[in-house]
Amino acid sequence: MNYIKKYNEKTFESIKHINEYGNEYWFARELMVALEYTKWSNFIGVIHKAENACKLSNNNVDEHFSDVGKTINMPKGATKTIDDYELSRYACYLIAQNGDPRKKSIAIAQTYFAIQTRKQEISELEYSQLSEDEKRFFQRKLTKKGNYSLNQAAKNAGVKNFDRFHNFGYKGLYNGETADDIAKRKGLRYREDILDNMGSEELAANLFRITQTESKLKRENIKTESGANKAHYMIGKNIREVIEKNGGTMPENLPTPIKSLKELEKENKLLKY
């Protein structure tokens, strides 16, 4: 048991990566080495079996097995693109389940990823059992992290006026309302944070706006302030259209919590989130 714990920490944890949204993933090429496979041609067969198992379990294969390429350096300054995958924890578990059972590393990986996958399931269950205010604290933390990453992406896109940039996103999502308009409608004091005065559903809609805008700025390599503003507006508008299409409540019609998160913090209703 001590060997397994040591192997987990030095192997699977050491090759784990975290993306800009705080999600963890593993590269297939690195996992291949950890599982003691020497040829990609052999390991890709295991990946395909795992993908099929994922599909048969009614899970989205693309969500867990993201096909990516890597450029590696070759002799004399040449480069070469090789196949690779970004794998979720669940994908790694399925790969371990379909690997060579004679390998001790496979047995260890099966145990490790099964435990970690179960921990994630428990976390999701725990979230569903949180109170509304606890969910608000959790979602607010995610929006803070998301806005930090979004601001970095916006800066790289050439944005100088960040208030204007964020207002484009709000206007798309809130049918033309700016941050000040939202604050006035909610009856907030001057400079009071509007995100601290949203329920978990409204925060979730804004988190989606934030993460999708960052992704679009990076994916399309947008390099002008006007382009970034337009992208933010369109993402907000698209999310609004999806909410409407699914019969949801428009963000501006969602109730404002009686107490802001700042007020709850003062009452010592702090959470670990």
Image (spheres, helix red, strand yellow):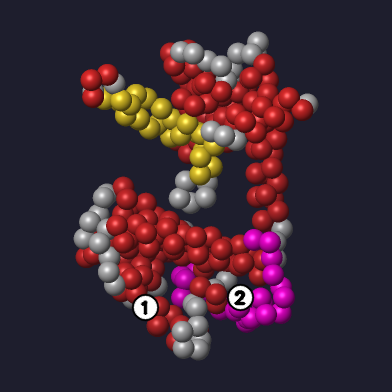
Q: Residue 139, can we see it?
A: yes
Span shown in magenta: 248-273
Q: Nearer the viewer, residue 134 or 54?
A: 134
Find residue 137 and report its image quarter: bottom right
Residue 165, percent from left and from top: 31, 69
Asked whether 75 falls inside the magenta stretch, the response is no
For residue 261, the mark is: 2
Residue 26, percent from left and from top: 51, 34
Residue 61 to residue 128: above or below: above
Residue 108 to residue 24: above or below: above
Q: Residue furthest front?
A: 76
Residue depicted at 63% across the width and 19% down the height: 106
For residue 19, the mark is: none
- In this rendering, the label closer to the viewer, 1 or 2: 2
Q: Quadrant of the N terminus?
A: top right
- Going from N to C along the chain, the mark reached first, 1 or 2, is 1
Residue depicted at 32% across the width and 29% down the height: 71
Q: What type is the residue that disc 1 sits on? A: Thr
Q: Nearer the viewer, residue 124 or 1?
A: 1
Q: Quadrant of the C terminus?
A: bottom right
**Which residue bears the numbered disc 1?**
178
Q: Residue 113, can we see it?
A: no
Q: Residues within 10 Å of mark 1 (few under 14, many from 20)?
A: many
Helix, strand or loop for the magenta stretch, by majority = loop
How far apart marks 1 and 2 lie (CA) works out to 21 Å
Residue 159, percent from left and from top: 27, 65
